[in-house]
Image: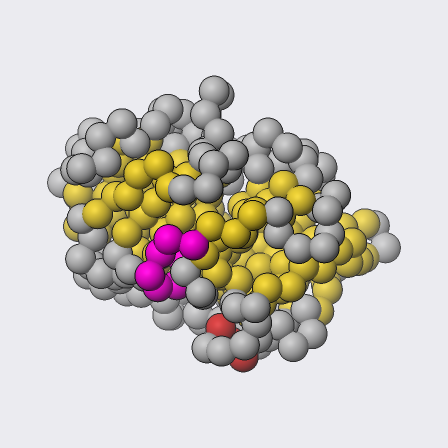
Amino acid sequence: MSFRTAQRHGYAVEFSPYYPQLLACATCQYYGIAGSGSLFLLESLPQGVRPVQKFDWNDGLFDVTWSENNEHVLVTASGDGSIQIWDTAQPQGPIKSLHEHSKEVYGVDWSLTRGEQFILSASWDQSVKLWDPTGNKSIATFLGHQHVVYSAIWSPHIPCCFASTSGDHTLRIWDTRNPQISKLVLTAHDAEVLSCDWCKYDDNVIVSGSVDSTIRGWDIRRPQSPIFQLDGHKYAVKRVKCYPFERNVVGSSSYDFSVKIWDFTRPQPCLETIEHHSEFVYGFDFNLHVPGQVADCSWDEWVRVYTPKCLAPT
């Protein structure tokens, strides 16, 4: 099933944590180089993917995350250095725009552990900021990366803990109670690290994807060397996601126009390669409610929702 984000190039796609059929896609005009951005709210139905709402912003939108405490609220990352908080019940525009970064915001994430409701923003100004969505100013700024920060991802297990990835080849682990210094600095790849995700079954395992075309798994208790490496993409790995229904399965999207599904415990770890795009595949996500279902989005203006053969229920 597919939906075309006409004249908008896909950067990120995320399923709703509340409704199995809802997903959001962050997009940009002109491949994110110039122009405006749009946030599409889509519904995946047996007869196809249909648009529910569309929100426009005056700069490109590079990432999107859903609120974990309000089914109507989403947050986007923008090329103008701001983050936007949207309420689908108030479609006239964002309910709030928070602008403190001095360069593009490339990643946003909403906290996952019980008792916390915070947003992270990762920016090309080499910083990560922590926000309370009810406030108007950031709570803390995390400095230490020596290059642009591409992503900041909350641990689903450990309160106050998140990881960030950067063009400086490192993955860093942070504690929000001590923003002055990262808990762990891990030289994760031989090139820029574009993405990371935490294993849903082991609070010490994190997976990273890089411009060097590899995916690596790390145990943060023993970070001297990766616990696995996945080779097979021809170009940069833009997004990695850990599968919520099986410990050993990882999905990835790449500049080589493909999505791959992996089982990192197998001698031949690549379970399937999906090639249904004609441009960089920027966004990728697993549906938390429907085992096996995934969504991806690409610079070719298409969002696709499907179940890879290797993940189809038997």
Quadrant where the N terminus sits is bottom right
Residue segment shown in magenta: 99-106
User: Residue at the spot x=62%, y=52% of the render?
Assistant: 94
User: Residue at the spot x=58%, y=54% of the render?
Assistant: 13
**Residue 123 visible in the picture:** yes
Considering every residue shown, the one lying at the far front of the view is 136
User: Residue at the spot x=62%, y=36% of the render?
Assistant: 17
Q: Quadrant of residue 286?
A: top right
Residue 227, above or below 31: above
The answer to whether 76 appears left or right of 149 in the picture is: right
Q: Which percent across, then down, holds residue 170?
A: 21, 51
Q: Which percent across, then down, holds residue 202?
A: 37, 27
Q: Quadrant of residue 57?
A: bottom right
**Residue 290 visible in the picture:** no
Nearer the observer, 2 or 162: 162
Nearer the observer, 139 or 309: 139
The answer to whether 123 appears left or right of 61 in the picture is: left
Q: Which percent across, then down, holds residue 55?
A: 67, 59
Considering every residue shown, the one lying at the far top of the view is 115
The answer to whether 61 appears left or right of 169 in the picture is: right
Considering every residue shown, the one lying at the far right of the view is 47
Residue 128, above or below 220: below
- Specify whether residue 157 is painted magenta: no
The answer to whether 120 appears left or right of 75 in the picture is: left
Q: Quadrant of residue 228?
A: top left
Q: Which percent across, then down, holds residue 269?
A: 41, 49
Quadrant where the C terminus sits is top right
Q: How is the image coloured?
A: secondary structure
Nearer the observer, 43 or 35: 35
User: Residue at the spot x=25%, y=43% of the render?
Assistant: 142
Prevalent SS, magenta region: loop
